[in-house]
Amino acid sequence: MKLCILGGGGFRTPYVYQALLRDQGSPRVESVVLHDTDPDRLASMTAILGALASGFPDAPRVTSEPDLRRALGGADFVFAAVRIGGLAARCCDERVALDQQVIGQETTGPGGLAYALRTVPYMLDVARVVREVAPQAYFLNFTNPAGIITEAMQSVLGDRVVGICDTPSGLGRRIAGLMGLDHRRVQPDYVGLNHLGWMRGLRHDGVDVLPHLLASDALLDRLEESLVFGKDWLRTLGLIPNEYLYYYYFHRDAVAGVLRSSQTRGEFLLDTQTAFFDKVRHADGTDAADLWRAAVADRSASYMAEAKGGEQGAPAHVDVSEPDPAHQGYAGVALGVMTAISRNERATMILNVRNRGTVAGLPPDAVIEVPTTVDANGVHPLTIDPPDLHQLGLMQSVKAVEQLLIHAAVHGDRATALRAFALHPLVDSVTVARELLDGYIRTIPEVAAVFAA
């Protein structure tokens, strides 16, 4: 089978390749084609993958292809993790919002909307090429904001586009690990949108173990979400929120934490990744792989550092949770989807899929994040209990914004873009929304280009 990785020069590529190296089932991916617009980064990642393949005589063959159509042609699966505008644009996503005392995180709030505005048109073009040269392919989207991009692409490719996120599945695995349970035998009760969801229960052999977790100080002290939200708030809610809900439940604290820091997340990554790629250019393959591992460790250590009392490059806490038993994260989720489809090995995982009535109160074509069965016939969201009023209300509000944003990006409609910014729950004034949209158009050429016509 052929896998095409869009954004193949990016940091996530080795994760995906390592998952493929460990996979010994049949059929399996035999050809990996990397596509990227940056030839230097593409060369660096190709060298790293070569080093990782050492000792694997049947490692999937890796090639690079700068031409999009040739890269996609005949692919069985496509994995996409692209960043339109690069990390420089991400820094603008953050700073324009912070100037208005609003969080600028890349997937949450106005920063995520700016990221989506410039990304939707490109990903729709990609979808049209896939439809032409690889109509049989399943498209595994990790490009952020994953829910918005997946929903936009489904207008072209339908249910063959699946949004991938490791956060919900990883949460279920970590809770199972903390409680000494086999993660393969737990069933999560999870509902939400991408980066906006709630683990409402976790059943093991028919028994919900989440109440036991919430009642135990010793267990909660080892759960990373306790560090982010606090044990009292988790118990008040009676569930475990997706960590990105920190930006909703503690918005003022989140903004203050970033403003106190010397760097935003985007600025930290821009500095560290620039330094990494500079070093890789002068390293051989083995040294390049070691440099990547060290860079990944630094990157992971500062993940959501401000929410845990630290800052980028100077985290206050190390990860207090048990490691992911699969050690694969989102690459493991992607591999799980591919093997379930190609081998008809039915599996259940939390994915971004079309609603189709799963959550009453949301449109049928809205992309939601819920437990989903995957097999040779595709993806099938499971029946779940309805969300409560708080959950549904926030989901409806954010989904309305997302759908307005897609329309604005497709049609270059500035008035609709303003509506999307102004109606977002984290933007508390139409005046602020105008300043945000104007700021993004002024500072990010790829956003300005959406409205240039």
Image (cartoon, helix red, strand yellow):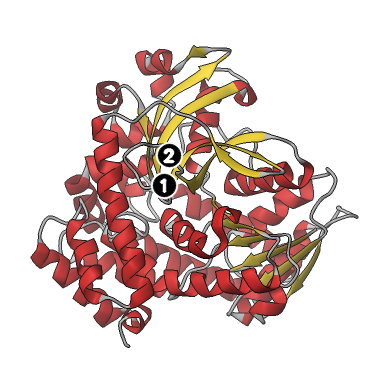
| Residue beneath the point at 33% across and 37% down | 228
Relative height, residue 203 to residue 26 (above, below): above
**In the rendered structure, which amino acid carries the disc numbered 2?**
Gly
Relative height, residue 179 to residue 162 (above, below): above
Task: Say whether residue 205 is left or right of residue 220.
Answer: right
Instruction: Say few, some or many: other residues with alpha carbon within 10 Å of mark 2 (under 14 / 14 to 19 / 20 or more).
Output: some
Front position in the image: 269 or 69: 69
Relative height, residue 246 to residue 280 (above, below): above
Residue 173: % across, % down: 55, 30
Per the rendering, the mark at residue 357 is 2
Residue at mark 2 to residue at mark 1: CA–CA distance: 6 Å
Front position in the image: 201 or 352: 352
Front position in the image: 407 or 200: 407
For mark 1, what is the residue?
364
| Callout 2–callout 1 Cβ contact below 8 Å | yes
Residue 432: % across, % down: 12, 65
Quarter occupied by the C terminus: bottom left
| Residue beneath the point at 31% across and 42% down | 245
Instruction: Say few, some or many: other residues with alpha carbon within 10 Å of mark 1 (under 14 / 14 to 19 / 20 or more).
Output: some
Question: Quick one: which residue is furthest to the bottom in this view?
Answer: 453
Element at label 2: loop
Quadrant location of residue 71?
bottom right
Relative height, residue 326 to residue 449 (above, below): above
Residue 246: % across, % down: 29, 42
| Residue beneath the point at 45% across and 62% down | 152
Element at label 1: loop
Front position in the image: 287 or 5: 5
Residue 17: % across, % down: 71, 56
Residue 309 visible in image: no
Question: Quick one: which residue is furthest to the right in this view?
Answer: 57
